[in-house]
Each structure stands twice: as structure tokens, then as C-alpha cells.
Amino acid sequence: MKISEEVNKRKTFAIISHPDAGKTTLTEKLLLFGNQIRSAGTVKAKKSGKFATSDWMEIEKQRGISVTSSVMNFPYLDYKVNILDTPGHEDFSEDTYRTLTAVDSVVMIIDATKGIEAQTIKLFKVCKMRGIPIFTFINKLDREGREPFELLEQIEEVLDIKTYPMNWPVGMGKRFLGIFDRHNKQFVKYNGNEEESYIPYTELDNPEHKDLVNNATYQETNGELELLDQAGDDFSIEEVLKGDQTPVFFGSALAPFGVQTFFDTFISMAPTPTARRTTDGLVSPDSDEFSGFVFKIQANMNPAHRDRVAFLRVCSGKFERGMTVKLARTDKPIKLSQTQQFVASAGGTVEEAYAGDIIGIYDPNAYRIGDTLTESKNTFEYDELPQFPPELFMRVTAKNVMKSKQYRKGIEQLVQEGAIQLFKGHPMETIIIGAVGQLQYEVFEYRMKHEYNVEIMLESIGERIPRWLKAEQVDTSLFDERNLLVKDREGNFLVLFKNDFALRWFKDKHPKVELTDLFEVN
Ligand code: G4P
């Protein structure tokens, strides 16, 4: 098969949501469609730690994180589906953000009873700044939730993206009757625990559906539907692909209800891999030459061997096991031999992969996050991965001052690897590390101890709101422990505000000082 044919089958996406919105439940249903699991409950069991995990590092074991669940791939209809997991809960970290650089589209789940929540906003911002197409699934329609119009309005206002309802719910909770599938012009009937049924619009007049059609909730919703048709935005696939409009689907992942039509429509509309920017211009996914970039490194999978796996997003050409490629940063050849594994639901070795696929390659401590691997003669590199704004900050010191050499080396290497972010106090150069999630600290502490033989002390300075500012606007007298002035690795100044109130107060007092959110610059 030609490379372009393979590439055009790839649908690589992530599911983003706030914890408890239903990501695990929805993922599980998609795996059922793809015949990857036989019964519901498998993924949940894994999440709750009831599933056997292999002998990876302790923290990962405790948390039940596994590579096999980081990437799930399966054939569906004519497509090859790759779902990348974006860990939520306590596992939320910079890796969660970075994963979004490796996908071609995103499914955003919103809990209809809660509306948009904090973690969704953060993950959404990353998608928006990278122009990733976003498909929305509003979940838990089997429960009393917010009004559909209110939910759409919230998405438009809070997330600043246009919405197009692909379907429209008729009632919710106990009054839930089903959805008008506007896209496929059919009514999908909710039958409680029974399977959903499909009634084409043209058949709704049939006497057998009169109970449904005469129902007061149905009648009321018909009016809303007309309003939508007349006054709502038109559907535009071009805008969807640019990330300016999000198709919205209502349903229930648990029932499951509306999941099949959602998935089929999403899969047919979601983009296949497109050209990506490099230092050598755009590289097309169907180019003959293999290339890709590392977006995540999972360390210490096996404490006995200190193995690490680098997750590589294939961006062009064909990957074949055993091939020799070049690591662009060093210009040195690397043979991708036996040890790489395909991170699929079944695990195992991958023989070949194409643009859109994710492969796990054995990392003999050679790779860094953002590294480009290529078969091409002229070395090029994919765009650098953005730095994401950390939220938790700690002052760090070595317990034993005699170990300061290893301590510095450990920090330097782990920072370079992207495990943690480094900041320095100003003018006192205390070492402050920043992370997106608590897990990053646990991994950092563990690795400092086990890889560099240094015990460290961490002193939390809490959740902070970082804002960057220009060097010429720095006036040290304006800052204190509450609004802490620090420098990042590149020497740029930033302020770690104690909380939102402190940030607003500062802005009011010093309107001339320009403060930048990292999400805006990336
Ligand atoms: P997450 O991965 O996004 O964190 O969410 P998860 O799927 O684990 O779902 C969180 C909770 O919401 C679970 O309930 C799950 O059963 C429930 N849920 C998911 N989708 C739906 C839905 O469509 N309707 C309703 N009513 N509930 C839904 P739990 O009580 O926390 O867990 P469990 O006891 O069901 O395992």
C-alpha cells in the first residue's frame, strides 16, 4: 500500500476532560466498538488499580499508570484509530499537555450537570493555541443537567469558540427521550437500559411514533430545533478543522447513548495527519522519508534495568523495525532495533508504522523531549515543544551538602529531560522547581534518590499563578513572598502570584507592568 493511503486511514486523537466527566467510561465504549475489550468494566478496573500492572516503578504501580493505556490503537471501519490518554486526577502533569502536541484532533468531554470545569479550560487552551480541531461530547444526559442552550453559551463564552450542535437532546434525566441527530437526519430514541433505536426524520409521522411525537417535552424541543436551524451558526468543516468551531454532541457515555453516532460522525470528520512545521519548512506526512518527534519519556519502567521508553509521534514516511535514523540534535545515527515496542492495547513489537502512529522506542538515555528523529539526509527539526505554565512550586535543597555535585547534575539532567521546570529566586538564587502536577514532584524526588543518589528536601510554596514580564519593567521593590519574583531557565523574569486575588490587586496597582500568561506566548 502506498504511504499516502496508509496516512489517510490514521485518526489520532486525545480525549480531554475534567476528572469525573466520563473520559474512562467513554474510552471504554470506544474500545468496545473497536473490539479491543470484551466487556465494559475493563478499563475502569485498570484505573482503580484492580488490574495487574507490570513491575514498573513504585509510583506508577501505586497510581496504576501504564504505557499500554497511554496509547490505544485499533482498526475501526476503514480507519486506524490511535487514542492518546491524557492523564487527569493526580497524574495531571506537563506530559498531559505535551500529549496534545502529538494528536491531530481532540474530543472534549463536558459533564452536562457541571458545565465547563477548570482542567478542561487548561487543556482546551493548549488545543486552541495549536489550532487543533475540537469535537465536544456533552455527557450524562441521563441525569438532570444544565439546559443545552446554557451549555453552548458557556462553551462559546468561556472557551471562545463557535459551537454547532450536531444533535439536540429532547429532555434530560427522567424526561430524557433521545436526540435529534441533525447531521444524519434521524431521531435516536433513548430506551433506558435497552439499546437505542433510530428513526429517520421522514418516518417520524408514522402512527407508531405518535406517543413520542405528542409528548410535551418533544413538542417543546421541536421549537428549539427550529430556532437552531434558523438562528444558529451554519456548520463549517473548514472552521472545525481550523479549530474555530466545535461540533457538539449530546449523549451518555454510561448508558451508552448517542455514543455510536457520535463516534462514527467524529471519525469520518476528524482530520488525518497533516504537514508539520520543521526548521526545513513543512514536511508532508506522505513523504517517503521517515521522521517523527519525541513528545514524552517514561522513565524507570523497570527499576532493575532503568529502562526508559520514549514516545515518538511518527510525522512522515514509514517506520520499519531495525531501521537506522538520525537524531537531529546530535546528527548521530541511531538504530531503532529490537527493543522498541508498540504501545498498543495488546503491547508487543511493532514492525511498521506511519504518520499519525505513536511508537514507543527504547531509550538508552539518549533522547530528550522534543527530539526529532529522521531518515532524511538534510537534518531538520520539528518545532520545539512549548513550555507549559507550571502551577505548583517548591523550593528544593539537598539534604546532605556534601552531595551538591550530584544534586546539581540531577537537577540539570531532569530539567533538560522535561521532567520538571527550573526557576531561580531573584536576587537570591534559591532553586525553585515548578510542575503542572504533583506526580512530577514524586517522580523527581524518586529519581533524584535512585538515579543520582541524592536525598532532597522540598518546601512547598504552594499553587501559584505565574506571569512573565519584561526585564525593563522589573522593579524589585514591588515584589515579596506573596508576589515572588523569579527567573526561568532562559533568564526571563516572572512573578509567582499567590492567588488570583493577588494577581488582580497587582494589576490594579501597577497597570503599566505588562504580564503575560505562558498560554498566550506559546
Ligand atoms: P473520568 O475518567 O473522566 O474521571 O470519569 P469516569 O469515566 O471514571 O466517570 C466518572 C463517574 O461518572 C463514574 O461514576 C461514571 O460511572 C459516571 N459516568 C460517566 N458517564 C456517565 C453518564 O453518561 N451518565 C451517568 N449518570 N454517569 C456517568 P462513579 O460513581 O464515580 O464510578 P462508578 O461507581 O460508576 O465506577
Image (cartoon, rainbow, N blue to C red):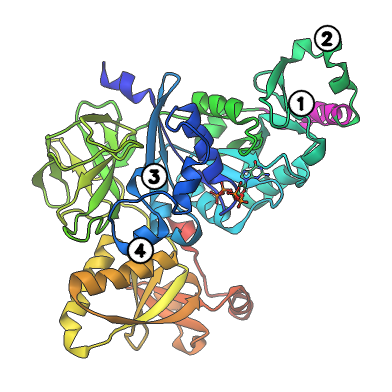
Q: Are marks 1 and 3 in contact (CB under 8 Å)?
A: no
Lower position in the chain sequence, tag 1 or tag 2: 2
Q: CA distance from mark 1 to mark 3?
A: 40 Å
Lower position in the chain sequence, tag 2 or tag 4: 4
**Residue occupying the point 46% across, 71% down:** 392
Please tell me in which quadrant of the rendered image residue 414 appears. bottom left
Q: Quadrant of the C terminus?
A: bottom left
Q: Which residue is mark 1?
A: 229
Lower position in the chain sequence, tag 1 or tag 4: 4
Residue 299 visible in this rendered orientation of the protein: yes
Secondary structure type for disc 1:
helix
Q: CA distance from mark 2 to mark 3?
A: 46 Å
Q: Nearer the viewer, mark 1 or mark 4?
A: 4
| Mark 1 lies within 8 Å of ligand 1 (Cβ measured) | no
Residue type (three-letter) at the residue carrying disc 3:
Ser
Q: CA distance from mark 2 to mark 4?
A: 59 Å
Secondary structure type for disc 4:
helix
Q: Nearer the viewer, mark 2 or mark 4?
A: 4
Label placed on residue 59: 4
Q: Which residue is mark 2?
A: 206
Q: Quadrant of the N terminus?
A: top left
Q: Nearer the viewer, residue 178 or 122?
A: 178
